[in-house]
Amino acid sequence: MVSLDEAVLARWEYGGKRYEILCDPELVDQFKADPSSVNIDDFLATDEVWHDARGGDRPTGEIIEKTFETQDITQITIKILEKGNIQLTTNQRKGLVEEKRQQIIHEIHSTAIDPKAKTPHPRTRIELALDESRFSVDPFKRVDVQV
């Protein structure tokens, strides 16, 4: 089990209620790709579904059954991860931003031509231009939209 200090919240709002689970940030992508490849005990910090994990507010079994149509924590986890959102750690977010930034630079480098030299703009020039213009990369928007 992941420790509570290292766990991140996966949250889904449905019917005016919030449902949260505490999960391992390292295993989220692997779990989304193939839930059977991850041991649920290693993935979750607690075997509970919460209305408010920080406040310790839990829904009743009836509400869980009505909302998720099951009491199985694996099925509930799959549904929350599919339909909800996950709070990323700072390191994960920085990694996503840097990866998306490199994709944007590559896209500009491969499509834009310097009209004077008739060659592609150098990567360093593109990086400096992005820094100088204080371009903010959104890790969740598509590359072609941001270019």
Image: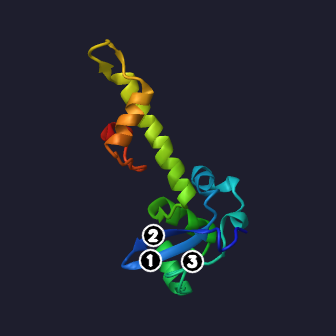
Q: Is residue 81 left or right of residue 35?
A: left
| Amino acid found under the numbered disc labelled 3 | Val
- Choose between 133 and 15: the one closer to the eye: 133
The picture places residue 38, in percent across and down from the top left corner, at 69, 57
Q: In the image, what residue occupies the spot 39% across and 29% down?
A: 125
Q: Nearest the camera: 104 or 13?
A: 104
Distance of mark 1 from mark 3, alpha carbons?
10 Å
Q: Amino acid at mark 2?
A: Trp
CA gap, disc 3 and disc 2: 11 Å
Residue 69 placement (x, y as % from top left): 51, 73
Numbered label attached to residue 58: none
Q: Residue at x 62, y 71 (%)?
A: 73
From mark 1 to mark 2, how far is it between C-alphas?
6 Å
Numbered label tally: 3
Taking the image as shown, residue 100 lies to the left or right of residue 4, namely left
* Location of residue 112 (image quadrant): top left
The residue lying at 36 percent from left, 49 percent from top is: 136
**In this picture, is 51 found above or below 74?**
below
Residue 42 left/right relative to 132? right
Indicate the position of residue 74 as horizontal and vertical percent values: 62, 66
Mark 3 Cα shell of 10 Å, populated few (<14), some (14-19), many (≥20): many
Chain-order first, disc 3 or disc 2: 2
Image marks 1 and 3: residues in contact by CB distance under 8 Å: no
Secondary element under disc 1, as helix, strand or loop, is: strand
Task: Check disc 3 and report the residue beneath it.
Answer: 49
Residue that badge 2 annotates: 12
Q: Residue at x 45, y 70 (%)?
A: 12
Q: Earlier in the sequence, mark 1 or mark 2?
A: 2
Q: Mark 1–mark 2 contact, CB under 8 Å?
A: yes
Q: Which residue is mark 1?
A: 18
- Quarter holding the N terminus? bottom right
Three-letter code, disc 1? Arg
